[in-house]
């Protein structure tokens, strides 16, 4: 039995879906614990390509329990559309469970997300406009609607009669937008509740019982460490806790049941939306990393926006190891570097204001983080395809050196390497779940 958290170690879009798909084979329960329809997880299997937003990719395996945990925010329309699409393709919903206490993204959240972004002008965050920030804001303000409320017509009516007039003040007076009708929303969302009701339950209890039955549980993070509300590049973050600690709160389990934390990083780095990105590359290198036109092009799964691309940042890698307590890493998309004459890794930062060198991120505070410029080490590229490699020693020597360097820099082993989109384009260097556990010592690098 092993209970494993998979988290993004960068700015999201690290290729977590491929890693969770791989690990789902041996999991009995797959749990999403935060975020909502802002996520976009692509999995390529023999029967085709699947793009997930809200539903755990574990649904691809018949018989797994797939949980949408209480820390998520669920847009019922998006959920039902995604589920309908999966069922049309023959997938089975018998293991699907939705937390009664997850919060619901309502129509006013979607409208306000877009209106707030427009109003921010040059200070915009570049959100996915899926209503994520406003839904979590209402949760914190204790004016949120939870999934359970969609199952109770009287409760939902009372809540909407209080909330909608207040939202309409914002819509009409602040944003000059038309008001919403509480009655219409009530009717529509009770109908969504009716359609969702068979999946709704206390998911925390299900997970706890699975732990007692010594089942394997996989906690699937969305977004990434640098997008974490507390530990990311605030304010250019999402509104949830994608980091490992967030799994406990968002799934409703205690930290003592967690056996492993696996961080997923691309072999380079990407970001969608605004915010600091020290190793970002414009021009030809950025375009080459973006691989536009290829099936794995760096384009956001949810929004279709081109991703900003840059070199692997080992300073942020060490930060992700620290914040998540990573045991090991999975490095994805190594094959994207196959055609580069040289590749670079950021090993430290230089403060553009003081000239000082920092081997560690001095602070994630925006005023300091945005002053950091990368100090690189440059390596010869391998200029050979890696997609057919199935073991570490199959890889070109320069690629092996590159991975060894990343491992040494971030301070945890690289256990998995992905060299292509398909399930079998994968190299397992060491067992990510049962391999040696990382032990913190005085000399452990952070
Ligand atoms: P929000 O989560 O839609 O509020 O967006 C906040 C920030 O997180 C923006 O920069 C988004 O581009 C980014 N973001 C949200 N979800 C994802 C994701 O799944 N992958 C990558 N970036 C994301």
Image (cartoon, grey):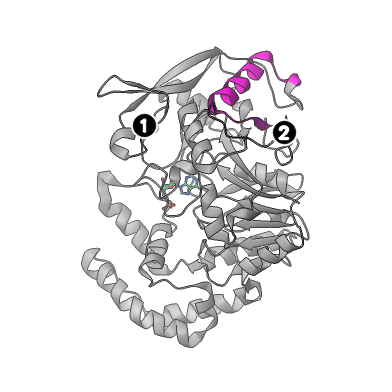
Of labels 1 and 2, earlier in sequence is 1
Residue at 47% across / 35% down in the picture? 319
Q: Reply above or below: 17 against 411.
A: below
Q: Position of residue 173 (x, y in %)?
A: 21, 68
Horizontally, residue 373 falls left or right of residue 432, namely: left
Task: Give the labeled residue for mark 1.
Answer: 362
Q: Is residue 116 magenta?
A: no
Q: Quadrant of residue 60?
A: bottom right
Which residue is farthest front? 442
Horizontally, residue 65 falls left or right of residue 158, namely: right
- Other-residue count near label 2 (Cα within 10 Å), few / some / many at <14 / 14–19 / ≥20: many
Which residue is farthest left? 173
Residue at 68% across / 21% down in the picture? 385
Q: Quadrant of residue 429?
A: top right
- What range is drawn magenta here? 393-415
Q: Position of residue 121 (x, y in %)?
A: 26, 48
Q: Nearer the viewer, mark 1 or mark 2?
A: 1
Q: Reply above or below: 413 against 47.
A: above
Asked whether the viewer can see residue 313, the reply is: no
Q: Quadrant of residue 79?
A: bottom right
Q: Secondary structure at mark 2?
A: strand
Q: Position of residue 41 (x, y in %)?
A: 59, 48
As rendered, which of 195 and 88 lies closer to the eye?
Answer: 195
Mark number, residue 426: 2
């Amino acid at each position: 039995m092993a209970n494993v958290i998979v988290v993004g170690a960068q700015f999201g879009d690290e290729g977590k879906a491929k890693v969770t798909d791989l690990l789902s084979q041996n999991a009995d329960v797959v749990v999403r614990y935060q975020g909502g329809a802002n996520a976009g997880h692509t999995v390529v299997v023999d029967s085709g390509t699947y793009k997930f937003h809200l539903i755990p990719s574990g649904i691809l395996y018949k018989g797994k329990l797939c949980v949408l945990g209480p820390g998520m925010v669920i847009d019922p329309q998006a959920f039902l559309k995604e589920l309908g699409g999966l069922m049309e393709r023959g997938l089975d919903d018998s293991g699907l469970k939705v937390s009664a206490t997850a919060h619901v993204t309502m129509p006013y959240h979607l409208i306000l997300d877009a209106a707030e972004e427009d109003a921010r002008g040059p200070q915009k965050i570049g959100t996915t406009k899926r209503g994520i920030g406003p839904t979590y804001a209402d949760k914190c303000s204790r004016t949120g609607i939870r999934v359970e409320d969609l199952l109770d017509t009287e409760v939902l009516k009372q809540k909407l009669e209080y909330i909608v007039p207040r939202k309409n003040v914002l819509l009409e007076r602040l944003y000059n937008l038309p008001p919403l009708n509480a009655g219409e929303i009530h009717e529509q969302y009770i109908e969504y509740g009716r359609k969702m009701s068979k999946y709704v339950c206390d998911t925390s209890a299900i997970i706890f019982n699975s732990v007692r039955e010594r089942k394997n549980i996989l906690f699937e993070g969305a977004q990434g460490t640098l997008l974490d509300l507390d530990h990311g590049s605030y304010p250019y973050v999402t509104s949830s806790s994608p980091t490992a600690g967030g799994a406990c709160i968002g799934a409703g389990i205690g930290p003592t049941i967690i056996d492993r934390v696996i961080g997923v990083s691309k072999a380079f780095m990407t970001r969608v939306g605004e915010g600091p990105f020290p190793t970002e590359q414009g021009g030809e290198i950025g375009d080459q990393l973006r691989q536009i036109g290829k099936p794995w092009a760096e384009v956001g799964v949810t929004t279709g926006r081109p991703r900003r691309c840059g070199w692997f940042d080992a300073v942020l890698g060490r930060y992700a190891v620290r914040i998540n307590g990573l045991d090991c890493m999975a490095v994805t998309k190594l094959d994207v570097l196959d055609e580069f004459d040289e590749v670079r890794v950021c090993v430290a930062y230089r403060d553009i204001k003081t000239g000082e060198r920092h081997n560690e991120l001095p602070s994630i505070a925006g005023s300091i983080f945005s002053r950091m410029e990368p100090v690189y080490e440059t390596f010869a590229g391998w200029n050979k395809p890696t997609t057919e490699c199935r073991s570490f020693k199959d890889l070109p020597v320069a690629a092996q050196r590159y991975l060894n360097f990343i491992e040494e820099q971030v301070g945890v082993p690289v256990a998995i390497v992905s060299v292509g989109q398909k399930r079998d384009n994968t190299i397992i260097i060491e067992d990510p779940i049962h391999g040696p556990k990382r032990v913190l010592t005085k000399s452990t690098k952070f």
